[in-house]
Amino acid sequence: MKNLFAFVTFGNLPFSQLAVKSLKETVHSEYDIFAVVGKPGDWATKEWLTKEGIPHIMHPENLGFPYSLNDIYDYAWVQNDYDNVIIFGNDIVFYPFAGDSLIQLAQTTDYEVISALQYDVKDLVGEFPEVATQFREGNYNIEDFSGEPWKKFQNFSSIQQLAHMQLFDIQNLCLYKKSVFEKIGYTDVNFYPAYFVDNDYARRIVEAQIKCCSLVNARFFHFWSRTIHQESGGSNSSYFNNNKNYYRLKWGGDFGQETSHPDLKISSRAGELETVRRWRSKK
């Protein structure tokens, strides 16, 4: 089976470098990597990706996270023929066995969406208070990785532990088989620049009765929203409220309280740029 690990960046190059380094150190299955550089003019990230031999594209304007995910889907399933796409955040660290466990389960079962289980910076500081000094108070900013505080956590395993029909996280480390794209298609770019797009895609997965699970043993460390806290982010609270209201309108209620049944499959990217620019203007 052909596997593609793919991620979206918006600045914060040191985090992307760490994420890819941990991927290469921990995943032993065969795979390729692809990246979308979402921050216009981020030549430092583009140059690093080129040096690393990682195929990528860079957006000429801030097109948002859903649009970037759709670029990944196009690269994987329109331009190429990958069996599995593993989306990962650019501010995570792969723990041992995480990537391989996702791939092995996909190869041996009919699960179509398989998510991993995060262990984030707040969990880390709560369990190991001695590492708190390596992060700034408030938003847990970190600039010096040399202490590697995430390595304090060791509760991962090669033994698969499944949570059937449960999705812990569908965008920071999650595997999708091509059949998912064939059934529900692209992400909805109305959720510009990012908020609630994961809720929407998860709801569509469930409504389409796509077989999914989470791997409890497949763990990853998440620095927690570095694009917002340590980068300009291209977002603000107005976007959050706009997207929340759009989700309610589309689904007839908040997440878990949906009453409407919109079309589950988005088959075309026609009109995406116009949609993104319209939502971007609603700051």
Image (tube, rainbow, N blue to C red):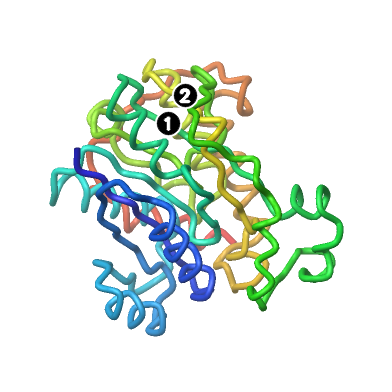
Query: Looking at the rendered structure, which numbered label has been put on residue 220?
Result: none
Picture residue at 49% right of the left edge, 61% below the top:
90
Picture residue at 50% right of the left edge, 56% below the top:
193
Considering the image in quadrants, where does the C terminus appear? bottom right
In this rendering, position of residue 265 left or right of residue 76: right
**Residue 277 visible from this viewpoint:** no
State which tag comes first along the sequence, 1 or 2: 1
Residue 138, image x and y in percent? 83, 64
Amino acid on which disc 1 is placed = Ile
In this rendering, position of residue 268 left or right of residue 38: left
Q: Nearer the viewer, residue 99 or 64?
A: 99
Image height of 184 relative to 59, above or below: above
Instruction: State the image quarter where residue 249 is shown.
Output: top right
Residue 199, image x and y in percent? 53, 35
Amino acid on which disc 2 is placed = Cys
Residue 44, image x and y in percent? 41, 84
Query: Looking at the rendered structure, which numbered label has been put on residue 114?
Result: 1
Callout 2: 10 Å neighbours few (<14), some, many (20+)? some
Image height of 117 relative to 90, above or below: above
Q: Are marks 1 and 2 in contact (CB under 8 Å)?
A: yes
